[in-house]
Image (tube, rainbow, N blue to C red):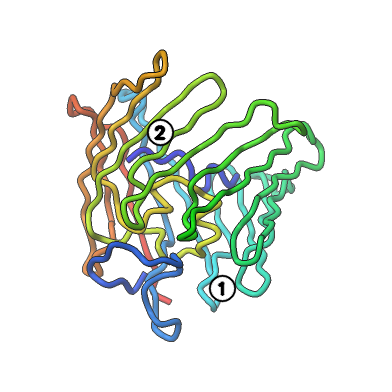
């Protein structure tokens, strides 16, 4: 269950027992009922088994249950909303200096694009655009870091119900495909704002359930060749939410471990 995204990329629930997902990704309960909100993620990566790397992310919410701040060793991010929609994320370094901000653009009720704007390094500016199917599910994204978008990184998604069954990432000279199998429990991110989940991307956040198996392939001469399988073992709390996920490679070696903590609000 490799997750290189959450707040690294931003620098990067009360739940029912099981479900196949909810269409609006806004959580499963009546707004008047308390929710279990993800408050801390501790991740240990075992890319170098002799020197595992640990990262800790904390999440803070306002009284409406909206995510308003994330913090990690890399800095902090603050969130601004308009009528329930995130419109801006400010990204600060460890010195609390604004490095860049992310601006959200909408087409009606769909997130159309997110632009990252750097004040001092405009060559770092980038835009990610979103495309949807008739069910309102994201089916592809395009990440551009040049005005003419000459070399985009394109991610495409296929679905089984509301879960992402496969995702393909192509660009930068490489192509990767991941096929997923899931449990029937809701994932830790389920009560985050649906637009933030879309912005974060990937099956680990966008799918309502937790994947148990990842089959990873690369493309060679137009043919997908599977070269990796990861299997996750998950522990759940009394609400059916993951508290620990241990991901292992096919040979039994550790890949990553995720510990999740929650608050009720």
- The total of numbered circles placed on residues is 2
Furthest residue toward front:
134
Give percent across and percent down for residue 83. Answer: 65, 75
Residue shown at the point (46%, 25%) measured from the top left: 175
Q: Relative to the observer, which residue lies in front, 211 or 246?
A: 211
- Residue picked out by circle 2: 53
Q: Relative to the observer, which residue lies in front, 83 or 121?
A: 83
Give percent across and percent down for residue 12. Answer: 56, 44
Q: Quadrant of the N terminus?
A: top left
Q: Is residue 24 above or below residue 211?
A: below
Q: Quadrant of the C terminus?
A: bottom left
Badge 2 density bin: few <14, some 14–19, many ≥20, Cα 10 Å? few
Residue shown at the point (47%, 40%) measured from the top left: 156
Q: In this view, does 237 lie to the left or right of 153?
A: left
Give percent across and percent down for residue 255. Answer: 30, 32
In contact (CB < 8 Å): disc 2 and disc 1: no
- The secondary element bearing badge 1 is classed as loop
Q: Is residue 162 above or below residue 129?
A: below
Q: Quadrant of residue 81?
A: bottom right
Instruction: Tell me which numbered mark, 2 or 1, is placed earlier along the sequence.
Output: 2
């Amino acid at each position: 269950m490799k997750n290189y995204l959450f707040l690294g990329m931003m620098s990067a629930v009360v739940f029912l027992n099981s479900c196949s997902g909810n269409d609006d990704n806004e959580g499963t309960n009546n707004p008047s009922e308390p929710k279990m909100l993800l408050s801390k993620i501790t991740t240990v990566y075992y890319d170098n088994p002799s020197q595992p790397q640990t990262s800790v992310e904390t999440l803070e919410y306002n009284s409406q249950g909206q995510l308003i701040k994330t913090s990690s060793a890399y800095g902090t991010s603050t969130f601004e909303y308009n009528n329930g929609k995130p419109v801006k994320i400010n990204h600060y370094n460890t010195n609390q200096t604004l490095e860049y901000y992310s601006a959200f653009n909408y087409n009606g009720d769909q997130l159309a694009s997110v632009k990252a704007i750097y004040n001092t390094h405009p060559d770092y500016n980038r835009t990610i655009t979103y495309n949807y199917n008739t069910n309102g599910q994201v089916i592809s994204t395009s990440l551009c870091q040049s005005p003419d978008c000459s070399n985009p990184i394109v991610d495409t998604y296929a679905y089984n119900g509301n879960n992402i069954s496969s995702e393909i990432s192509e660009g930068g000279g490489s192509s990767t495909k991941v096929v997923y199998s899931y449990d029937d429990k809701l994932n830790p991110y389920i009560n985050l704002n649906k637009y933030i989940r879309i912005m974060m991307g990937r099956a680990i956040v966008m799918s309502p359930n937790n994947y148990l198996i990842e089959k990873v392939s690369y493309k060679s001469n137009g043919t997908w060749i599977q070269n990796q399988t990861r299997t996750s073992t998950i522990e759940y709390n009394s609400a059916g939410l993951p508290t620990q996920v241990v991901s292992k490679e096919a040979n039994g070696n550790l890949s990553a471990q995720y510990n999740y903590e929650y608050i009720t609000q």
